[in-house]
Image (tube, grey):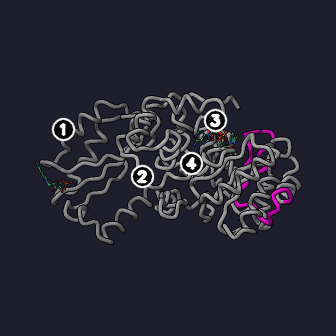
């Protein structure tokens, strides 16, 4: 099993056979190290209930917690009627996995959005604007909105919030979108952390907007990032920002440091993420807070895209679907449950990057891309 060490809790599902677990489950248990983990069994049966298999599990491991499992009659489990669903929901809630959290980060491929823990819907595919001049950002934003994109990502440090604002205005003036239909993200730069309130107002002014959909802190900076975060929380209460989040927190404890010190839990974490740096561990970790992962450098970033585009696995999946490597990578991000914001200054690329909702990667293809993980970042900040 991939990345087994990274899991703290393991759900094990099996049917009761002759009052026991099937041999294949024993094999699995014997082949993995469960030290320090929690096991949660769930079973189907025809009358034996768990048949004492919970005790069997407890007796097998000294340093493993075995939680109360759930046993359902096979026929009920197959039908999955409302009361069966309710029983499962209640059980998960008791275990500390409330359904709302799980639902809150489900990507909806019909609406192309995800519901954030703040309650707002966020588009799952957006335009990135890093390294674009004001003028390029204006054009790219306009082209993106015209092509169907509803999420635009900028930052004060990119120096192009004004251009993004002009691109949005152009699209609104032409009737392509309304303000409410779009989602604008900007970031607070580290040198502004002591002066959050004025930094937020300055971003609003440059963007020409009266609220920012999502504002995130650009980088971890332990000496004052919580102060900066608090200024964003204040702006949420004043209606200037709708959702708040973080960027560039690569250590779980560092993320917890902020998340546990603030009132409004981060809606999103934007980190470098692509097939060679899949961020699986962090994605699982932040899910506890209902926080969604967003990928920057989704295509590898300027100067590295060809490495990913020419990767044999990606190129062969691309030719099987008659799609480009960029489209395969972007589709992978969304199916893997991370928001992607490919950057581009080229209208044809922008159109191509949005054209990924008419095909689906199979489980096997997703597994093949999962195997490309190298834990290798292209950037060093
Ligand atoms: N939080 C952070 O610290 C942080 C850091 C970096 C980036 N970001 C955000 O994440 C966004 C994405 O990252 P990124 O823009 O640096 O890298 P990226 O999206 O991985 O790659 C951008 C590069 O891909 C090319 N490209 C885009 N679509 C293509 C296509 N369909 N075919 C061929 N080439 C294509 C672009 O060239 P063309 O212009 O020619 O299309 C550009 O050179 C940024 O724009 C920014 O908003 C955040
Ligand atoms: C070889 C075998 C042995 C079984 N032994 C038991 C048993 O001891 N107690 C019980 O309640 N059900 C027993 N069952 C019934 C299964 O637990 C039940 O059909 C369950 O729903 C099968 O899981 P499934 O529907 O997910 O395949 C047995 C079924 C098989 C095939």
Asked whether 324 or 370 is in front, the reply is 324
Residue ID at (41%, 43%): 38
The residue identified by callout 1 is 23
**Which quarter of the rendered picture does the C terminus lie within?**
top right
Decide which of tag 2 and tag 3 comes sooner along the chain. 3
Residue ID at (48%, 59%): 109
The quarter of the image that holds ligand 1 is: top right
Q: Does mark 4's beta carbon lie closer than 8 Å to ligand 1?
A: yes
Few, some or many C-alpha atoms within 10 Å of disc 2 (few <14, some 14-19, many ≥20)? few
The residue identified by callout 2 is 359
Q: CA distance from mark 4 to mark 1?
A: 47 Å
Looking at the picture, does residue 65 appear above or below residue 240?
A: above
Q: Secondary structure at mark 1?
A: helix
Quadrant for residue 206, please give it. Answer: bottom right
User: Which span of residues is magenta-colored?
Assistant: 205-229
Disc 3 vs disc 4: Cβ atoms closer than 8 Å?
no
Q: Position of residue 300 (x, y in %)?
A: 59, 34
Q: CA distance from mark 2 to mark 3?
A: 24 Å
Q: Secondary structure at mark 3?
A: loop
The residue identified by callout 3 is 301
Q: Does mark 3's beta carbon lie closer than 8 Å to ligand 1?
A: yes
Residue 282 has which mark?
none
């Amino acid at each position: 099993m991939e990345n087994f060490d990274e899991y703290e809790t393991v759900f094990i599902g099996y049917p009761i056979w002759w009052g026991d677990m099937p041999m294949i489950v024993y094999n699995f248990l014997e082949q993995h190290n469960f030290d320090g983990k929690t096991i949660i069994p769930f079973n189907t049966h025809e009358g034996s209930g768990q048949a004492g298999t919970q005790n069997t599990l407890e007796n097998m491991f000294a340093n493993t917690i075995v939680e109360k499992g759930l046993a359902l009659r096979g026929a009920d489990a197959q039908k999955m009627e409302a009361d069966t669903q309710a029983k499962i929901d209640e059980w998960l809630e008791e275990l500390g996995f409330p359904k709302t959290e799980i639902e809150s980060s489900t990507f909806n491929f019909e609406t192309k959005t995800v519901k954030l823990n703040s309650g707002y819907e966020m588009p799952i595919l957006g335009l990135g604007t890093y390294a674009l001049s004001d003028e390029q950002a204006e054009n790219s934003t306009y082209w993106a909105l015209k092509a169907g994109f509803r999420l635009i990502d900028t930052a004060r440090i990119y120096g192009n919030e004004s251009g993004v604002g002009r691109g949005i205005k152009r699209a609104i003036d032409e009737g392509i979108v309304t303000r409410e239909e779009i989602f604008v993200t900007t970031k607070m730069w580290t040198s502004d952390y002591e002066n959050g309130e004025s930094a937020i107002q300055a971003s609003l002014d440059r963007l020409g907007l009266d609220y920012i959909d999502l504002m995130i802190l650009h980088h971890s900076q332990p000496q004052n990032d919580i102060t900066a975060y608090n200024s964003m929380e204040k702006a949420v209460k004043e209606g200037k920002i709708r959702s708040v989040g973080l960027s560039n927190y690569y250590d779980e404890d560092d993320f917890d440091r902020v998340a546990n010190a603030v009132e409004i839990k981060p809606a999103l974490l934007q980190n470098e993420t692509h097939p060679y740096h899949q961020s699986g561990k962090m994605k699982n970790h932040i899910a506890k807070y209902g926080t969604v992962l967003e990928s920057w450098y989704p295509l590898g970033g300027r100067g590295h895209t060809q490495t990913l585009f020419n990767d044999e696995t990606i190129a062969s999946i691309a030719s099987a679907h008659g799609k480009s490597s960029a489209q395969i990578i972007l589709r992978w991000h969304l199916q893997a449950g991370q928001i992607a914001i490919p950057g581009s200054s080229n209208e044809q690329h922008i159109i191509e990057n949005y054209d990924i909702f008419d095909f689906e990667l199979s489980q096997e293809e997703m597994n093949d891309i999962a195997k490309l993980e190298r834990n290798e970042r292209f950037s060093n900040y």
